[in-house]
Image (tube, rainbow, N blue to C red):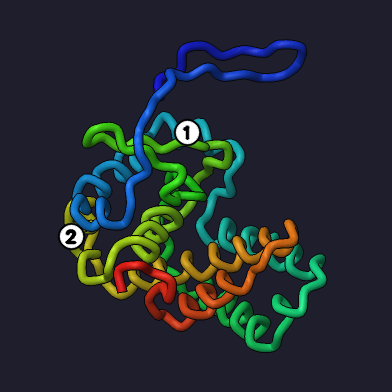
Amino acid sequence: PPVLASGTINGVTYVVQEYITGNYPGWRWFAEHVPTLAAFIKRYHSDQPLASLLAANTPTSYPEHIALDLASLENQCISLHSEELHAPTIVSAFEKLKAWSKQLQTVPLVPVHPDPNTKNILLTNDSLLMVDWDDIQLSDPMRDAGLLLWWYVAQQQWHEFFEAYGLIMDNKLIERIYWWAARTSFAIALWHVEHKYDCRGFLVDFLAAVNRESNPHAVFH
Protein backbone atom coordinates (compact mmCIF):
# COMPACT_ATOMS: atom_id res chain seq x y z
CA PRO A 1 0.00 0.00 0.00
CA PRO A 2 1.16 3.59 -0.63
CA VAL A 3 3.16 5.22 2.17
CA LEU A 4 1.37 8.34 3.43
CA ALA A 5 3.86 9.45 6.07
CA SER A 6 6.91 8.28 7.96
CA GLY A 7 9.18 9.59 10.66
CA THR A 8 10.27 9.15 14.27
CA ILE A 9 8.43 9.95 17.51
CA ASN A 10 10.36 9.73 20.78
CA GLY A 11 12.96 7.53 19.11
CA VAL A 12 10.40 5.16 17.62
CA THR A 13 10.20 4.93 13.84
CA TYR A 14 6.74 4.87 12.26
CA VAL A 15 5.29 4.38 8.80
CA VAL A 16 1.69 5.26 7.90
CA GLN A 17 0.24 3.47 4.88
CA GLU A 18 -3.07 3.64 3.10
CA TYR A 19 -5.65 1.29 4.61
CA ILE A 20 -6.47 -1.49 2.17
CA THR A 21 -9.23 -4.08 2.41
CA GLY A 22 -9.11 -7.36 0.56
CA ASN A 23 -9.31 -11.12 0.83
CA TYR A 24 -6.66 -13.76 1.28
CA PRO A 25 -6.22 -15.66 -1.99
CA GLY A 26 -6.44 -19.43 -1.68
CA TRP A 27 -4.64 -22.08 -3.68
CA ARG A 28 -7.51 -22.22 -6.19
CA TRP A 29 -6.99 -18.54 -7.01
CA PHE A 30 -3.28 -19.14 -7.54
CA ALA A 31 -3.99 -22.16 -9.75
CA GLU A 32 -6.31 -20.07 -11.91
CA HIS A 33 -4.03 -16.99 -12.07
CA VAL A 34 -0.50 -18.40 -12.32
CA PRO A 35 0.74 -15.76 -14.84
CA THR A 36 -0.62 -12.98 -12.62
CA LEU A 37 1.24 -14.43 -9.64
CA ALA A 38 4.44 -14.65 -11.69
CA ALA A 39 4.19 -11.03 -12.87
CA PHE A 40 3.49 -9.86 -9.32
CA ILE A 41 6.59 -11.55 -7.90
CA LYS A 42 8.79 -10.56 -10.84
CA ARG A 43 7.89 -6.90 -10.25
CA TYR A 44 9.59 -6.63 -6.87
CA HIS A 45 12.32 -9.15 -7.71
CA SER A 46 13.45 -6.83 -10.51
CA ASP A 47 13.14 -3.56 -8.52
CA GLN A 48 16.68 -2.17 -8.78
CA PRO A 49 16.24 0.85 -6.43
CA LEU A 50 14.91 -1.53 -3.78
CA ALA A 51 17.81 -3.92 -4.36
CA SER A 52 20.28 -1.07 -3.95
CA LEU A 53 18.74 -0.09 -0.61
CA LEU A 54 19.06 -3.65 0.67
CA ALA A 55 22.56 -4.27 -0.65
CA ALA A 56 24.36 -2.56 2.25
CA ASN A 57 23.36 -5.31 4.70
CA THR A 58 23.72 -8.28 2.35
CA PRO A 59 26.71 -10.53 1.70
CA THR A 60 28.09 -9.93 -1.76
CA SER A 61 28.08 -13.53 -2.94
CA TYR A 62 25.41 -16.20 -3.23
CA PRO A 63 27.54 -18.92 -1.54
CA GLU A 64 28.28 -16.63 1.41
CA HIS A 65 24.60 -15.79 1.77
CA ILE A 66 23.65 -19.49 1.86
CA ALA A 67 26.49 -20.42 4.24
CA LEU A 68 25.59 -17.68 6.74
CA ASP A 69 21.92 -18.64 6.64
CA LEU A 70 22.65 -22.32 7.28
CA ALA A 71 25.06 -21.50 10.09
CA SER A 72 22.39 -19.38 11.77
CA LEU A 73 19.81 -22.18 11.49
CA GLU A 74 22.27 -24.75 12.83
CA ASN A 75 23.18 -22.59 15.85
CA GLN A 76 19.50 -22.01 16.55
CA CYS A 77 18.81 -25.74 16.36
CA ILE A 78 21.70 -26.60 18.69
CA SER A 79 20.37 -24.14 21.27
CA LEU A 80 16.96 -25.81 21.35
CA HIS A 81 16.29 -28.89 23.45
CA SER A 82 13.84 -30.89 21.41
CA GLU A 83 13.75 -34.63 20.81
CA GLU A 84 12.03 -34.05 17.46
CA LEU A 85 14.75 -31.71 16.17
CA HIS A 86 17.60 -33.93 17.28
CA ALA A 87 16.15 -37.21 16.03
CA PRO A 88 18.67 -39.08 13.81
CA THR A 89 16.43 -38.74 10.74
CA ILE A 90 16.25 -34.95 11.09
CA VAL A 91 19.98 -34.57 11.87
CA SER A 92 20.84 -36.63 8.80
CA ALA A 93 18.45 -34.62 6.62
CA PHE A 94 19.98 -31.34 7.78
CA GLU A 95 23.46 -32.63 6.91
CA LYS A 96 22.07 -33.52 3.50
CA LEU A 97 20.68 -29.99 3.18
CA LYS A 98 24.10 -28.50 3.96
CA ALA A 99 25.89 -30.73 1.46
CA TRP A 100 23.23 -29.99 -1.15
CA SER A 101 23.72 -26.23 -0.68
CA LYS A 102 27.20 -26.46 -2.22
CA GLN A 103 25.70 -27.75 -5.47
CA LEU A 104 23.06 -25.05 -5.89
CA GLN A 105 23.12 -22.89 -8.99
CA THR A 106 24.57 -19.47 -8.15
CA VAL A 107 22.18 -16.69 -9.14
CA PRO A 108 21.96 -12.93 -8.50
CA LEU A 109 20.34 -12.01 -5.19
CA VAL A 110 17.06 -10.09 -5.49
CA PRO A 111 14.55 -8.52 -3.06
CA VAL A 112 12.40 -11.28 -1.56
CA HIS A 113 9.63 -11.63 0.99
CA PRO A 114 10.88 -14.39 3.33
CA ASP A 115 7.36 -15.32 4.49
CA PRO A 116 5.20 -15.45 1.33
CA ASN A 117 2.20 -17.29 2.76
CA THR A 118 -1.38 -16.46 1.84
CA LYS A 119 -1.94 -14.52 5.08
CA ASN A 120 0.63 -11.98 3.88
CA ILE A 121 -1.05 -11.52 0.49
CA LEU A 122 -4.22 -9.54 -0.13
CA LEU A 123 -6.42 -9.82 -3.19
CA THR A 124 -8.20 -6.57 -4.06
CA ASN A 125 -10.37 -7.09 -7.12
CA ASP A 126 -7.85 -8.78 -9.42
CA SER A 127 -4.74 -7.12 -7.96
CA LEU A 128 -2.34 -8.62 -5.44
CA LEU A 129 -0.71 -6.79 -2.54
CA MET A 130 1.89 -8.25 -0.20
CA VAL A 131 2.14 -7.06 3.41
CA ASP A 132 4.46 -7.64 6.39
CA TRP A 133 7.76 -6.70 4.75
CA ASP A 134 9.65 -6.44 8.06
CA ASP A 135 12.19 -9.09 7.04
CA ILE A 136 12.67 -8.09 3.40
CA GLN A 137 16.15 -8.95 2.19
CA LEU A 138 18.21 -9.90 -0.84
CA SER A 139 18.17 -13.63 -1.51
CA ASP A 140 17.54 -16.29 -4.13
CA PRO A 141 14.33 -15.50 -6.07
CA MET A 142 13.19 -19.06 -5.32
CA ARG A 143 13.17 -18.21 -1.61
CA ASP A 144 9.67 -16.83 -2.03
CA ALA A 145 8.60 -17.75 -5.58
CA GLY A 146 9.60 -21.37 -5.06
CA LEU A 147 7.81 -21.59 -1.72
CA LEU A 148 4.56 -20.28 -3.18
CA LEU A 149 4.81 -22.89 -5.92
CA TRP A 150 5.69 -25.77 -3.59
CA TRP A 151 2.98 -24.85 -1.12
CA TYR A 152 0.11 -23.78 -3.36
CA VAL A 153 0.59 -24.72 -7.04
CA ALA A 154 0.64 -28.23 -8.53
CA GLN A 155 3.93 -29.01 -10.26
CA GLN A 156 2.32 -29.48 -13.65
CA GLN A 157 1.58 -25.74 -13.59
CA TRP A 158 5.08 -24.59 -12.65
CA HIS A 159 6.11 -24.25 -16.31
CA GLU A 160 3.26 -21.76 -16.76
CA PHE A 161 4.63 -19.67 -13.89
CA PHE A 162 8.19 -19.61 -15.23
CA GLU A 163 7.10 -18.88 -18.77
CA ALA A 164 5.33 -15.76 -17.47
CA TYR A 165 8.24 -14.91 -15.14
CA GLY A 166 10.79 -15.28 -17.93
CA LEU A 167 12.88 -18.22 -16.70
CA ILE A 168 13.59 -21.62 -18.18
CA MET A 169 12.35 -24.37 -15.86
CA ASP A 170 15.34 -26.70 -15.87
CA ASN A 171 16.63 -29.16 -13.26
CA LYS A 172 18.85 -26.56 -11.59
CA LEU A 173 15.88 -24.29 -11.02
CA ILE A 174 13.74 -27.12 -9.65
CA GLU A 175 16.59 -28.10 -7.30
CA ARG A 176 16.56 -24.61 -5.85
CA ILE A 177 12.80 -24.76 -5.31
CA TYR A 178 13.10 -27.94 -3.26
CA TRP A 179 16.16 -26.68 -1.38
CA TRP A 180 14.43 -23.50 -0.26
CA ALA A 181 11.26 -25.43 0.58
CA ALA A 182 13.32 -27.72 2.81
CA ARG A 183 15.30 -24.90 4.37
CA THR A 184 12.19 -22.84 5.15
CA SER A 185 10.20 -25.80 6.48
CA PHE A 186 13.08 -26.48 8.89
CA ALA A 187 13.26 -22.81 9.90
CA ILE A 188 9.51 -22.77 10.61
CA ALA A 189 9.88 -25.94 12.69
CA LEU A 190 12.56 -24.19 14.76
CA TRP A 191 10.24 -21.23 15.29
CA HIS A 192 7.50 -23.59 16.50
CA VAL A 193 9.83 -25.23 19.01
CA GLU A 194 10.96 -21.84 20.32
CA HIS A 195 7.34 -20.83 20.88
CA LYS A 196 6.31 -24.18 22.42
CA TYR A 197 4.19 -25.25 19.44
CA ASP A 198 4.06 -28.64 17.74
CA CYS A 199 6.76 -28.69 15.06
CA ARG A 200 6.16 -32.18 13.67
CA GLY A 201 4.09 -31.16 10.65
CA PHE A 202 6.84 -28.86 9.38
CA LEU A 203 9.47 -31.52 9.97
CA VAL A 204 7.43 -33.81 7.72
CA ASP A 205 7.48 -31.04 5.10
CA PHE A 206 11.23 -30.63 5.63
CA LEU A 207 11.92 -34.31 4.98
CA ALA A 208 9.70 -34.34 1.90
CA ALA A 209 11.45 -31.35 0.35
CA VAL A 210 14.92 -32.71 1.16
CA ASN A 211 13.92 -35.83 -0.77
CA ARG A 212 12.64 -33.73 -3.70
CA GLU A 213 9.03 -34.74 -3.06
CA SER A 214 5.88 -32.67 -3.37
CA ASN A 215 4.37 -30.96 -0.33
CA PRO A 216 2.66 -33.70 1.72
CA HIS A 217 0.19 -31.16 3.12
CA ALA A 218 -0.70 -29.54 -0.21
CA VAL A 219 -4.44 -29.24 -0.66
CA PHE A 220 -4.25 -29.74 -4.44
CA HIS A 221 -3.23 -33.42 -4.13
Q: Dividing the image into 4 quarters, which one contains the C terminus?
A: bottom left
- Few, some or many residues within 10 Å of mark 2 (<14, 14–19, 20+): some
Using the image, determine if residue 142 lies above or below residue 50: below
User: Between residues 204 and 141, which one lies in front from this camera angle?
Assistant: 204
State the residue lying farthest toward the bottom: 88
- Few, some or many residues within 10 Å of mark 1 (<14, 14–19, 20+): few
Which quadrant of the structure image shows residue 153?
bottom left
- Where does the image place residue 203, in percent across and percent down from the top left? 58, 74
Tell me the tag on residue 52: 1
Q: Amino acid at mark 2?
A: Glu
Q: Secondary structure at mark 1?
A: helix
Which quadrant of the structure image shows residue 157?
bottom left
User: Between residues 1 and 8, which one lies in front from this camera angle?
Assistant: 1
User: Between residues 49 and 15, which one lies in front from this camera angle?
Assistant: 15
Q: Residue at x 75, y 16 (%)?
A: 11
- Where does the image place residue 167, in percent across and percent down from the top left? 24, 58
Give the side of residue 137 with respect to residue 11, left or right.
left
